Amino acid sequence: MSTPFSKRRFITDEKIIREVLEACKIIHIGIQDGDGVYVVPTNYGYTYEDGKLTFFTHGAKSGKKWDLIQKNPHVGFEIDTGFQLVDGGEVPCNFSNAYGSIIGSGRMSVVEENEEKCRIMTNVMKVQADRDFSFTPAMVESLGVAKIEVEEFKCKSGYLYKQKQ
């Protein structure tokens, strides 16, 4: 349950949400693994259009991550940036952190078609390196590529980003 303290940190301003998406470089994906959760950190690309967020990721074409999403495509994710200590002086309860984060859930699926893999990898490299790259189907043939179609997410900030009230 959210407290009034945490509610004030939720961000709905799309400009700030885009700033957080651009500032972060690693997505932590939580995938159901039996009675536990397997968490994988990886770099990412994304699209954010008309309030709809989709993440893209890649890696080896086989392995635990791929096996688990075949069994259960529902995943949780988290990205974050900042985390600068806000000094509370002599009162420990006044300490805080300056940060931006996005946390949510969605459905993760493997992308098989090489032309779509090329588009996704171009997006990932633009987000990661802020440069345009071209990929050929041969370059992505042996690459595992997935997308997370986000079903819900919240953006939150502690002091780092301020939205218009």
Image (tube, rainbow, N blue to C red):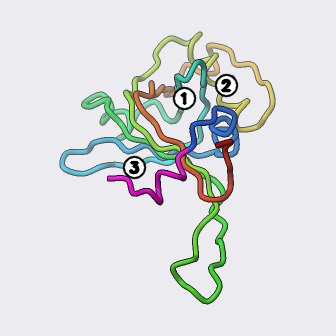
In this picture, which residue range is highlighted in magenta?
A: 1-10
Q: Amino acid at mark 1?
A: Phe
- Identify the residue at the far front of this view: 165
Q: Which residue is mark 3?
A: 39
In the rendered image, residue 112, in percent from the top left (x then y), is placed at 46, 15
- Tell whether label 2 touches label 1 (CB within 8 Å): yes
In the rendered image, residue 1, in percent from the top left (x then y), is placed at 32, 53
Local SS, label 1 = strand
Q: CA distance from mark 2 to mark 3?
A: 23 Å
Badge number at residue 123: 2
Q: Is residue 7 left or right of residue 139?
A: left
Q: Residue at x 54, y 48 (%)?
A: 156
Q: Amino acid at mark 2?
A: Asn
Q: Nearer the viewer, residue 16 or 135?
A: 16
Q: Which residue is mark 1?
A: 56
N-term-proximal mark, 1 vs 3: 3
* Residues packed near mark 1 inside 10 Å, few (<14), some (14 to 19) or many (20 plus): many
N-term-proximal mark, 1 vs 2: 1
- Identify the residue at the far left of this view: 35
Q: CA distance from mark 1 to mark 3?
A: 16 Å
In the rendered image, residue 39, in percent from the top left (x then y), is placed at 39, 49
N-term-proximal mark, 2 vs 3: 3
Q: Residue at x 78, y 34 (%)?
A: 130
Q: Residue at x 73, y 30 (%)?
A: 126
